[in-house]
Image: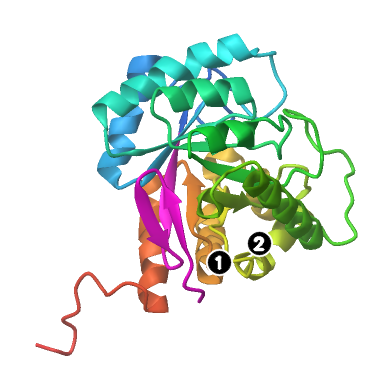
């Protein structure tokens, strides 16, 4: 495995890192939690819970990815900016990511203490990386196949979906560097299900090693996604086992950051893969030794 390092906030990680990014939605209509953390007190409780469970990062979002009611920039800020400030005050060492594609929102959350801008829509606002550079923040570049924010793909086709992912992410990362983002603060994400049908997401998972070979920190967002549900013909609330299977495969390929709803189960899977890979010692090893 490559010996590269990457930086998030004030912390440095190496290529054997497997980090859990816990999802905290400040939305009333999220596909998975159905608005359970819409209220600020509930959302703060969720942050406390995932931190206690061992999450390395929290990813705070103010707009659901799927189509729905229009949420303007001012409303998005109202949902996330003060909340980020509250999380930062309570958890000074926690890595905070904000899921937004808007530069104006990115600036506002970085001003109150966020560390990472998670651009889930593939550079839809080209100024987002400029804002990240200004604050020396980390940024997540994603592949969406050119679809507009909050739209679903319709009969989208690729000659080679993985090649499209590679080309898009390399181009986005190079542009981020060109405007001043530190190379070791750029994370790449193939964005399962975004601009992809289930066959595409499965192909990306199968060939994830081709993205790991780019020697950049790689984020995967697999949790309860439609490609898992369609693979097993299961509704949203019954996709944990399939998600964890995809997580284990992604970890074996060498992905570094896992954006998830279920922290405890994911952490156990990642630690088990790390132990098998020899990147982490067993928590206890007494069998046959006593």
Q: Residue at x 90, y 60 (%)?
A: 159
Q: Position of residue 147 (x, y in %)?
A: 81, 36
Q: Residues within 10 Å of mark 2 (few under 14, many from 20)?
A: many
| Residue at position x 37%, y 74% in the image | 279
Image coordinates of residue 287 in percent, x first then y, are 19, 84
**Mark identifier at residue 205:** 2
Quarter of the image with the C terminus is: bottom left
**How far separated are the C-alphas under marks 1 and 2?**
8 Å
Say which residue appears at 67% left-offset and 46% top-offset.
178
Q: Sort mark 1 into few (<14), some (14-19) or many (20+) by Cα contacts within 10 Å.
A: some
Which label number is shown at residue 35?
none
Q: Is residue 13 magenta?
A: yes
Image location (x, y in percent) of residue 155: 90, 43
List the residue tagged with mark 1: 249
Q: Secondary structure at mark 2?
A: helix
49 shown above or below 202: above
Towards the viewer: 271 or 18: 18
The residue furthest left is 290
**N-term mark: 1 or 2:** 2
In-image side of 290 versus 59 (left or right): left
Is any atom of residue 67 visible in this view? yes
* Disc 1 to disc 2: CB gap under 8 Å: yes
Q: Which residues are magenta?
A: 1-23
Q: Within the magenta stretch, is there residue 10? A: yes
Disc 1 element:
helix
In the displayed structure, does residue 152 sit left or right of residue 116? Answer: right
Give the quadrant of residue 149: top right
- Residue 78: x and y, percent? 50, 11
């Amino acid at each position: 495995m490559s010996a590269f390092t990457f930086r998030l906030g004030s912390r440095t990680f190496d290529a054997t890192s497997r980090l859990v990014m816990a999802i905290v939605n400040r939305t009333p209509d999220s596909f998975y939690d159905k608005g359970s953390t819409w209220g600020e007190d509930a959302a703060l409780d969720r942050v406390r819970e995932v931190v206690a469970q061992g999450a390395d990062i929290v990813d705070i979002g103010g707009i659901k990815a799927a189509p729905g009611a229009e949420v303007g920039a001012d409303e998005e800020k109202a949902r996330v900016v003060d909340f980020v400030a509250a999380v930062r005050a309570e958890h000074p060492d926690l890595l905070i990511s904000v899921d937004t594609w808007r530069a104006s929102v990115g600036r506002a959350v970085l001003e109150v203490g966020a560390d990472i801008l998670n651009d889930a829509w593939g550079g839809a606002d080209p100024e987002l990386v400029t804002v990240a550079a200004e604050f020396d923040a980390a940024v997540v570049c994603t592949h969406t196949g050119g679809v507009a924010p909050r739209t679903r793909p319709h009969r989208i086709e690729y000659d080679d979906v993985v090649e499209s992912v590679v080309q898009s992410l390399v181009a986005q990362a190079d542009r981020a560097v060109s405007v001043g983002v530190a190379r070791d603060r750029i994370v790449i994400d193939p964005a399962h299900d975004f601009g992809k049908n289930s066959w595409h997401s499965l192909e990306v998972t199968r060939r994830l090693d081709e993205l790991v070979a780019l020697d950049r920190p790689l984020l995967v967002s697999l949790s309860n996604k439609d490609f898992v549900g369609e693979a097993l013909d299961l509704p949203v609330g019954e996709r944990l086992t399939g998600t964890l299977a995809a997580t284990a495969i992604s970890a074996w390929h060498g992905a570094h950051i896992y954006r998830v709803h279920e922290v405890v189960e994911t952490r156990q899977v990642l630690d088990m893969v790390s132990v098998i890979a020899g990147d982490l010692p067993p928590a206890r090893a007494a069998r046959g030794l006593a």
